[in-house]
Image: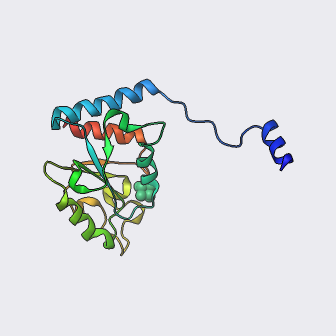
């Protein structure tokens, strides 16, 4: 134990250095999304994430929007637990056959006006799962899609830019 403590004091950390952050640009982008939401809805934006069979890579990037680095909630943008409270459905994955009905029901439970954003290459056209017997091959095969955000996975900044483009439409 003493040896481990000593080694941790004298050795450099094994973790990677954090990525270079451009806090000002990020804050400006998130604030633009918030302003666009208030212009369009008169309030801040509520987002419901739907995993329709993704590998979870896209989820990691979406979750990052809530971490201490991006901290989306400081701009009033928030993730909600129920589609009944959501303005935007962020849908990931190629929509597996098992998630087909769940996605339809989630869409129907979301009040108008609502937007659907297909996140990641799988959600656009099935991605690496395209052609599999187990998937439908993209979110727009099941529900109408307002915006595609490509990438495998798209970064949090790409997600924010996508939301801004959606609200500026
Ligand atoms: S787009 Fe890439 S990261 Fe996202 S669910 Fe598909 S394979 Fe995974």
Q: Nearer the viewer, residue 96 or 87?
A: 87
Q: Nearer the viewer, residue 64 or 9?
A: 9
Residue 162, placed above or below residue 59: above
Residue 16 visible, this angle: yes
Farthest-out residue, front: 2
Q: Nearer the viewer, residue 94 or 86?
A: 86
Residue 145 visible, this angle: no
Relative horizontal placement of residue 6, taking residue 56 as reference (left or right): right
Farthest-out residue, right: 3
Q: Position of residue 110 (x, y in %)?
A: 19, 56
Residue 80, placed above or below residue 94: above
**Measuring 38% from the left and 40% from the top, which residue is drawn there?**
158
Q: Nearer the viewer, residue 78 or 33?
A: 78
Q: Position of residue 26 (x, y in %)?
A: 41, 30
Q: Dividing the picture into quarters, in which one does residue 94 lie? A: bottom left
Q: Dividing the picture into quarters, in which one does residue 135 lie? A: bottom left
**Measuring 82% from the left and 42% from the top, which residue is drawn there?**
7
Relative horizontal placement of residue 96, taking residue 111 as reference (left or right): right
Relative horizontal placement of residue 103, taking residue 69 as reference (left or right): left
Q: Position of residue 89 (x, y in %)?
A: 26, 52
Q: How many marks?
A: 0
The colour scheme applied to this rendered structure is: rainbow
Q: Position of residue 136 (x, y in %)?
A: 30, 68
Relative horizontal placement of residue 142, taking residue 56 as reference (left or right): left
């Amino acid at each position: 134990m003493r040896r481990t403590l000593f080694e941790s004091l004298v050795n450099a950390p094994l973790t990677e250095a954090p990525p270079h952050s451009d806090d000002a640009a990020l804050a400006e982008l998130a604030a633009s999304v918030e302003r666009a939401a208030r212009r369009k809805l008169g309030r801040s934006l509520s987002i419901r994430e739907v995993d329709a069979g993704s590998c979870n890579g896209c989820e990691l990037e979406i979750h990052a929007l809530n971490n201490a680095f991006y901290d989306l909630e400081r701009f009033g943008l928030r993730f909600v637990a129920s589609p009944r409270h959501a303005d935007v459905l962020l849908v990931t994955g190629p929509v597996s056959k098992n998630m087909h009905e769940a996605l339809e029901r989630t869409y129907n439970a979301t009040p108008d006006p609502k937007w659907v954003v297909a996140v990641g290459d799988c959600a656009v056209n099935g991605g690496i799962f395209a052609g599999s017997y187990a998937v439908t091959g993209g979110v727009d095969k099941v529900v109408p899609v307002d915006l595609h955000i490509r990438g495998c996975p798209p970064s949090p900044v790409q997600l924010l830019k996508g939301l801004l483009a959606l609200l500026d439409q």
